[in-house]
């Protein structure tokens, strides 16, 4: 193994791990949802959390193809982007929470939601560039294992910080407590980026700078990706499964209600750490399984876990039920990261993986931004039981679709000889 790769593996793992401390302190689906609810947010705004997060992560990716054009300077530009665009949103949210008593509740909700939107918009612009850069650091035969280990540590760190955040909120549920969480999250984000800045990307400087794609070139690559039959089948299955996953923000709502067990906000945040534990275990297991058998296996396990989650929500309640639901949601999230992205890496039928990742996530974003909004409307109109039932039907359909129509990319003829 080259010296640079031995150096990059621990740096990647540490960078992701410390970033996990940041995300655990301000989990969108627990901490942020509880923050909004404590300041009067209704079902529609709660449903918009996932819509905003997924839409902002996915749709702005096309802008990244114009922002991060240089392969040689991509590492530096990505680190600078995080420091100047994303990290300030965490510190600004902390300031808004600190001065919340002097801000009307409606303006407070809109202000923190605006910061949340700006942060994930920043994530979206750099998302495809960042994952393509990480993929370029490691060969296919070990990529799933390394990234699975890195994302697993991030999830474990997120679980630990979520538990601490829950205990902190049980002792002090005032807005100033949330200010402390967002301030700490910003500091951990800064530290994490320092490790990414130290990664040795010598190969980027030794290889010739690729030709900058014009808009027509980019659209041609998009068309090549979307005309591939197996890639289309994969996207259809993912659209079905993400449509059934719009319920995630309402898990906290359900378990906080009398029907779900009337759990306190602090308890919900602490039990929500099981989501990070499930993600951590899933990242390692699905990453290694994917390297050995292909990442279609992880996609199937993710859809099966999502089906089990919805059955738990429909049939059970209480602390144990909440713990199991969040753990299985973590497995689903792991599949959506390690299995999904490796399927994107390996289904690329042309010479520009960055464009392939972008178009795949743009298509997927069409469903993922709509489903949480529809979920909020369904929950408000017909209640959570109807919402969970419809989501179960969509998820089961996705599982059947993956089994019947999606092939393992490594087994396709055109994949022969790809390193």
Image (cartoon, rainbow, N blue to C red):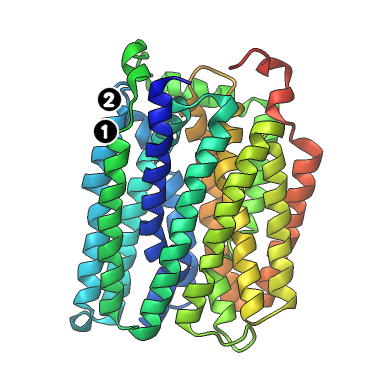
Badge 1 element: helix
Viewer-side residue, 384 vs 13: 13
Checking the image for residue 77, the label placed there is: 1
How many residues crowd around disc 2 within 10 Å: few (fewer than 14), some, or many (20 or more)?
A: some
Observer able to see residue 22: yes
Quadrant that contains the C terminus:
top right
Q: Secondary structure at mark 2?
A: loop
Residue 235, image x, y percentages: 63, 39
In the image, what residue occupies the spot 66% across and 18% down? Answer: 415
Write down the residue under mark 2.
73
Q: Is residue 46 above or below residue 395?
A: below
Above/below status of 374 relative to 234: below
The x and y percentages for residue 258 are: 60, 89
Residue 386 is left or right of residue 323, and the answer is right
Q: Is residue 61 visible?
A: no
Structural crowding at the residue carrying mark 1, measured as other residues with C-alpha within 10 Å and reported as few (<14), some (14–19) or many (≥20): some
Indicate the position of residue 231 as horizontal and vertical percent values: 65, 31
Q: In this view of the protein, which residue sits in the foreground, 254 or 316?
A: 316
Asked whether the residues under the numbered discs 2 and 1 touch, taking CB atoms below 8 Å apart as contact, a structural biologist would say: yes
Which residue does the image show at 26% across and 42% down from the upper left?
194
Q: Is residue 23 above or below residue 310?
A: above
Answer with the quarter of the image where residue 412 lies: top right
Q: Position of residue 244 (x, y in %)?
A: 65, 58
What's the distance in space between the residues labelled 2 and 1, CA to CA? Answer: 6 Å
């Amino acid at each position: 193994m080259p010296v640079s790769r031995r150096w990059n593996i621990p740096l990647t793992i540490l960078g992701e791990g410390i970033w996990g401390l940041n995300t655990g302190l301000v989990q969108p689906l627990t901490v942020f949802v509880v923050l909004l609810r404590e300041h009067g947010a209704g079902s529609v705004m709660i449903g918009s959390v996932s819509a905003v997060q997924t839409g902002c992560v996915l749709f702005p990716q096309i802008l990244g193809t114009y922002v991060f054009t240089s392969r040689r300077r991509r590492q530096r530009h990505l680190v600078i982007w995080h420091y100047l665009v994303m990290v300030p949103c965490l510190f600004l949210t902390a300031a808004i929470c600190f001065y919340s008593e002097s801000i009307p509740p409606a303006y407070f909700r809109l202000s923190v939601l605006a910061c949340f939107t700006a942060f994930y918009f920043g994530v979206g612009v750099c998302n495809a560039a960042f994952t393509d850069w990480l993929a370029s650091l490691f060969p296919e035969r070990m990529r799933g294992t390394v990234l699975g280990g890195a994302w697993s540590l991030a999830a474990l760190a997120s679980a630990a910080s979520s538990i601490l955040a829950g205990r902190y909120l049980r002792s002090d549920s005032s807005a100033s407590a949330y200010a402390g969480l967002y301030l700490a999250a910003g500091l951990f984000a800064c530290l994490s980026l320092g490790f990414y800045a130290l990664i040795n990307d010598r190969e980027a400087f030794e290889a010739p700078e690729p030709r900058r794609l014009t808009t027509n070139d980019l659209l041609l690559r998009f068309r090549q990706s979307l005309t591939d039959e197996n890639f289309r089948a994969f996207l259809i299955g993912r659209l079905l499964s993400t449509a059934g996953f719009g319920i995630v923000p309402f898990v906290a709502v359900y378990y906080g209600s009398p029907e779900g067990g009337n759990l306190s906000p602090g308890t919900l945040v602490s039990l929500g750490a099981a989501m990070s534990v499930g993600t951590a275990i899933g990242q390692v297991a699905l990453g290694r399984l994917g390297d050995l058998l292909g990442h279609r296996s992880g996609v199937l396990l993710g859809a099966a876990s999502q089906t089990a989650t919805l059955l738990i929500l429909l049939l059970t309640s209480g602390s144990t039920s909440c713990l199991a639901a969040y753990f299985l949601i973590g497995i689903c999230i792991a599949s959506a990261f390690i299995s999904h992205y490796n399927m994107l890496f390996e289904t690329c039928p042309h010479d520009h993986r960055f464009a392939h990742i972008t178009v795949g996530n743009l298509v997927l974003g069409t469903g993922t931004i709509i489903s949480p909004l529809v979920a909020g409307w369904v929950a408000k109109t017909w209640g959570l039981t109807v919402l969970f039932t419809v989501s179960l039907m969509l998820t089961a359909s996705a599982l059947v679709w993956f089994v019947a129509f999606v092939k393992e990319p490594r087994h396709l003829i055109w994949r022969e000889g790809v390193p």
